[in-house]
Amino acid sequence: MTLLADLLANVFERRYRSGRNGDLAKRPFTDLTMELMGTSGEVSGMNVARAILDRYSVSDETEKLAFFHHLAEDMTISPSSVRQALDAYEQGQTKASYRAFMTASEPPRQELIRRLNQVPGATKALVAMRSDLLRLGKGVAALEALDLDFRHLFASWFNRGFLVLMPINWESPAHVLEKIIAYEAVHAIDSWDDLRGRLQPSDRRCFAFFHPAMPDEPLIFVEVALTNGIPGSVQALLSAKREVLAAEDGDTAVFYSISNCQAGLASISFGNSLIKQVAADLSAELPNLKTFVTLSPIPGFRRWMEAEGHDALMADGDRLRALAAHYLTEARRPDGHPLDPVARFHLGNGAEVHRVHAGADLSEKGMQQSAGVMVNYLYDLARVSQNHERFAASHEIAASSEIRSLKSSVEKANA
Amino acid sequence: MTLLADLLANVFERRYRSGRNGDLAKRPFTDLTMELMGTSGEVSGMNVARAILDRYSVSDETEKLAFFHHLAEDMTISPSSVRQALDAYEQGQTKASYRAFMTASEPPRQELIRRLNQVPGATKALVAMRSDLLRLGKGVAALEALDLDFRHLFASWFNRGFLVLMPINWESPAHVLEKIIAYEAVHAIDSWDDLRGRLQPSDRRCFAFFHPAMPDEPLIFVEVALTNGIPGSVQALLSAKREVLAAEDGDTAVFYSISNCQAGLASISFGNSLIKQVAADLSAELPNLKTFVTLSPIPGFRRWMEAEGHDALMADGDRLRALAAHYLTEARRPDGHPLDPVARFHLGNGAEVHRVHAGADLSEKGMQQSAGVMVNYLYDLARVSQNHERFAASHEIAASSEIRSLKSSVEKANA
Amino acid sequence: MTLLADLLANVFERRYRSGRNGDLAKRPFTDLTMELMGTSGEVSGMNVARAILDRYSVSDETEKLAFFHHLAEDMTISPSSVRQALDAYEQGQTKASYRAFMTASEPPRQELIRRLNQVPGATKALVAMRSDLLRLGKGVAALEALDLDFRHLFASWFNRGFLVLMPINWESPAHVLEKIIAYEAVHAIDSWDDLRGRLQPSDRRCFAFFHPAMPDEPLIFVEVALTNGIPGSVQALLSAKREVLAAEDGDTAVFYSISNCQAGLASISFGNSLIKQVAADLSAELPNLKTFVTLSPIPGFRRWMEAEGHDALMADGDRLRALAAHYLTEARRPDGHPLDPVARFHLGNGAEVHRVHAGADLSEKGMQQSAGVMVNYLYDLARVSQNHERFAASHEIAASSEIRSLKSSVEKANA
Amino acid sequence: MTLLADLLANVFERRYRSGRNGDLAKRPFTDLTMELMGTSGEVSGMNVARAILDRYSVSDETEKLAFFHHLAEDMTISPSSVRQALDAYEQGQTKASYRAFMTASEPPRQELIRRLNQVPGATKALVAMRSDLLRLGKGVAALEALDLDFRHLFASWFNRGFLVLMPINWESPAHVLEKIIAYEAVHAIDSWDDLRGRLQPSDRRCFAFFHPAMPDEPLIFVEVALTNGIPGSVQALLSAKREVLAAEDGDTAVFYSISNCQAGLASISFGNSLIKQVAADLSAELPNLKTFVTLSPIPGFRRWMEAEGHDALMADGDRLRALAAHYLTEARRPDGHPLDPVARFHLGNGAEVHRVHAGADLSEKGMQQSAGVMVNYLYDLARVSQNHERFAASHEIAASSEIRSLKSSVEKANA
């Protein structure tokens, strides 16, 4: 059992602790990065890397910005070196010339970030660092380029193959659960009692992706309700007064909330994998499950209605549903993608617009965003690939016949 | 406890299992890679990636070679595209132009390898794939260049910060222990009894690095003996008849064997980190430990002696020790590095040549390699960085005064 | 890792789930107990045992009482059989005659309870059953005798050697933490935030005993504060505004709250073992700890004062302290034991009355019970045995010189 | 995760370590037991208990015997006290009189054993102690009576509800696996390779019961082969050259070896529960399994044949099968139980004699015990209870029609 006990011990070790490198951490960033990249960096790297992270952790915004500029400007590619290496490679495609090209075309800051990551627990600190960078570097070309390097490394480190899917339930550690409370982005969790209501009943499930180097930090999580039939009201779905279903009696899994947790992992997409993995795992566990749908908000609907001159307050339920069907399938950005951000996510994953419901979210936020209308996106695993392909190739949106006939009623009316 | 139970469950899932994609896996590699890199790859990627790995796993050498050539030639950089992107970047250093340069300068095969790695358990399959590539691609420039891409990705994935140090002992799982038997490279382990003799006694320790995505596979391991004083004979050290020491009574930790386990991780160096981490952990656990040394073979010594015209069989112990001291500190390759490969490793880590012993390894292999002489490299944690720096900068070799006076006796004799 | 994974899986299995023995569970208890004790009970026992537990779990108070009377009256010893077996044993002390005596002198209900315990998860159900029995059987001689059988078995099953001490902290599972909130008996925990304040800071610890057959249920827990010096105010000790100490900087561990969790384990004492084990574990982890004390309520102090004619509201701090010192060391029950129940517990464990503090608990409960006075009991591990022995032999109470001089001031005044 | 990490840590602590009670452990047993039972025993118990176990662990056979005699003679019941307590109880059945009777009728050595068990890891030492007692006390009435007390306590401690069923496989810890090798009692395991052959193939399983207080020590284990159809040859079944079946393709689970591991747990039966639990778990995991049988030796067959005047060497296969059917169902001990010990075990569990095979065990042991004949006992879960009941009530043996017609052929021939 030692193998595991030590794995556990190590998991604890992974929490980054600032070292006792007092003096080292007082030296300027420019010195420290030079040392970490220098000859002895390979051997004494851990200490220097820790000193940089320690110094960063106590830096104010100005110092952080200076550090980012240092990486962006002093540790970037040299176009002339790249060109020289490329010329040499073209003249003779050898191992050596290719290696030289690789070295020249990758900015040294990528290696710096990899060396910082040697320190146990550093991954979490680096994710936090990128979250600062995204905030501080917005609109600054050099810093946005620097962010591409972070993102490139993170995409490799947070590869799906390295992630671990774990159920979150009432037996999960409190320090993880408090993060679920903090990160829930769709339907806020008010209290520990509210959380228990999302985790403990037999018709509720929650799953998160974790990375082994950040075992305390969920990356993304999805909350699932098991139901009979496709639900049309989030308040009914979440009501503490509903009749609780035995898990094995449900025929439908409803993904009613998906939340990204790490600002520093922006644009590294986990949602698609998460939904598919959860659907596969739930299918294996509960063979009666036949349908996998969301019950999703339509955040841009009311704004669009107003822009189009429809009066949300005057419309009845049928009219709202028809308009929503139209909005979801026809309203586009200039680049051809759906106007609605949630629609972009699910349709990009290969889901179809399946049903729309009026009076489905009567919360203040729900009324304000979409006049209470919600939508079910259907994940039909047999058609997800094909849907995705058509969507990717030509922005073609998959929709059920119900949705198609609803939207055509609008179009006829408009005609 | 679910969190951990599921982490464990997931660890099992990580063992790659070929899918049931019968038809998919029969399609040619060129189709499959195109599909994986194409529009729907993002969504259906897992299946296609699995199909490629499945197909690869049943390929013969010719097919593997064809696959590697496909990656090397069809999925490499396009110098003209790189040049174009570089020109654009020089004209305007924007996020977009930098991103375009990044895309152009990274060969598509890197992204292919990352996408293959989405499949649970794929990391191990990819490490095995590189081991094939190293064998099959030797001397073929395009394949050696391809290997640099594998190596670049692996260096990032197998970053020290992602590795887990675990003690290996008699309570470790049998399927891990049988790998320790198989991979031991220095002093072969004959049998499970022999293995137990290296793990169970209170004066023996063993540690390995693991990667969470390959939990069954040690990456590198070190065997340690706890002793009183610095030992001068490996047979005495390993003798089953020795008096076994209580762990807390030892003052010296002897790293008597370090073995790399994964051919597919060649040139991604873990040894330096391993030794330092183990020294740090042992220090914390056993405060009486004062000295960290190796008892190392000198594989090139006898060949060098013969080349130099010294007769190994005629030399007495003192003469052998003096010659060994001279060999270790003075015999160099044309690039200035020590001739002896084990010396290169430890001196590169910042160790010093501390003592040499005649009659220290009386095994057939020991006599043949080094006429029975062995060496202790000392890891003095306070001087390791400085030693490394001098060695890296000017090939200066740290040696104890004993070694220095031994070798000067040879030099005087030669003078 | 399977060994552990399965241990975990099994731990989950231990949660008792009612079976699907519909028909069996409808039969009367008298039938079921006869069946469980009968010939086929050994083989089909699990089903019958589960049926009894199922039936019990849906019984109302009247049915439970009937079940207890059945055990108490139909499954008790037969004095004539005992006498007969005893006579035979006296005539010939053989294995057979001793076995016959053992059988006759143990009431069959003990074997029944052991057979009920075969069902996974039954231990928890049996502990709950005894808690019913204690409530329903109060004052009924036959049921109090039945309780002695439960208690006898539980004392054997919950032997110290079978208990597992575990730290409770902010990484413990939520379903265990909510029990800590529910069971805290001394200083109520208001909320999850309050709980976090008791678990997460570096100067706070909590430990509980668990039994492997009831892994979700703490049996008893103690909350510890690490301080510099012996504290004299519980509000100051628990204040969220205090300066938080690094664990390794404290010289004193204060056991400020000990709570039993299981009514069904009444009179099976864990507190003594818990305190000693926690003191030993903390000593090993934090070598700077020198002093182990409680900061304890004095629940009977004010009632005693009033009975003795002292006016708690009129007394100043010095007077209160002197009276408390006197009360704790001199006020006795007719059987010679201290009047104060908390004093009985700690003095029985071998602690000494060390200090008393006025204004130490200004909560409503604290003022009402003891006019705000609290006491430190000192656990001096070197003297605990001797203190205990004197206390057990002659009710001699160990007290510090400070306490002794305080109380003598009262006695002089009284004289 | 701490909860689990500490559970693990505690599991390690459970290994009994002799204390550093040098002086204490030198005192005579009679002093130490008196101290442990005395007033301060409750508080200082752990140290005294450890001293007794320490002293015992270095005692020779004479000292152990003296210790057992001390328990047997000085710590037994006092018939006059029992009689007195019984009289008082009959006169007034109160809680107090019942408690006094319980105290008088239980020998003090039971409480002593419970107090010894307070020490972490003591359970294993006590099991070993009983194994000594069984050996040294054979035929000595007072020591056999003492053993009944050990057995009584162990039956309570090793209650089915406290046991944990765990799969044993190639990922189990080596220190557990070496015990499987050591304890296998039916078909000896030659080597680690042989062991791997019993654990790793997809058509092999092994399960053991463990007790949480002795996590290193299997109590009993069963080896299972998954097959298609009921096998009739153990050599074929175990052949390394057989075609290995995918687990999910088998329709039959064959319990081909059951081994008790702990001599100190003699007559505390786990086999019945083990077989049923394993059958239930395998059924749930592998729904294609329809049949649960053994392939069992018939250890007394040849001896019986010889006693009956049948010449084993002259008989052909049909004759041997018929005789075996007759032997298994008709040959009885004077008490009416089957003559064959293995038959007693399985028939007592409710199995039926299902098939007999000649030439089924061609090993030396197999030929010698049973002229190569083996038997399948069938566990038909639907009939196990009823079979057991009939067997228990009237020694009626369940047998298949095949067995019944085979044995009737013998009877006809004899008639």
Image (cartoon, coloured by chain):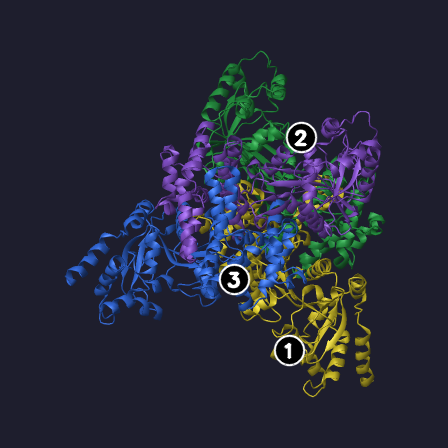
Chain colours: A purple, B blue, C green, D yellow
Badge 2 amino acid: Ser
Left or right of A26? Residue C361 is: right
Q: In percent of the image, x 39 and y 39: which residue is there?
A: A33
Output the chain of dot 3: B
User: Local crowd at mark 2 within 10 Å, few (<14), some, or many (≥20)?
Assistant: few
Q: Looking at the image, which is closer to me, C340 or A84?
A: A84
Q: Is residue A321 above or below residue D25?
A: above
Label 1: chain letter: D
Residue A100 in view of the camera: no
Tell me, yes or no, whether dots 3 and 2 are on the same chain.
no
Rounded to the nearest angstrom, the CA distance separating label 1 from label 3 is 60 Å
Residue type at numbered disc 1: Gly
In the foreground, D78 or B355: B355
The answer to which image quadrant residue B229 occupies is bottom left
Image mark 2: chain = A
Question: Which label number is shown at residue D366?
Answer: 1
Q: Which residue is mark 2?
A: A191
Left or right, C267 with respect to C348, comes to right
Q: Quadrant of the N terminus of chain D?
A: top right
Q: Which residue is mark 3?
A: B69
What is the crowding at mark 3: few (fewer than 14 residues within 10 Å), some, or many (at least 20)? Answer: some
Instruction: Give neighbour class at mark 1: few <14, some 14-19, many 20+ (Cα, 10 Å).
Output: many
Q: Position of residue A162 (x, y in %)?
A: 56, 49
In the figure, residue C208 lies in which quadrant? top right
Instruction: Report whether residue D287 is seen.
Output: yes
Same subunit, labels 2 and 1: the answer reads: no
Q: Nearer the viewer, mark 1 or mark 3?
A: 3
Image coords of residue D412 (percent x, y): 83, 83
Residue drawn at point x = 43 percent, y = 35 percent: A54
Q: Please say if A227 is above or below C326.
A: below
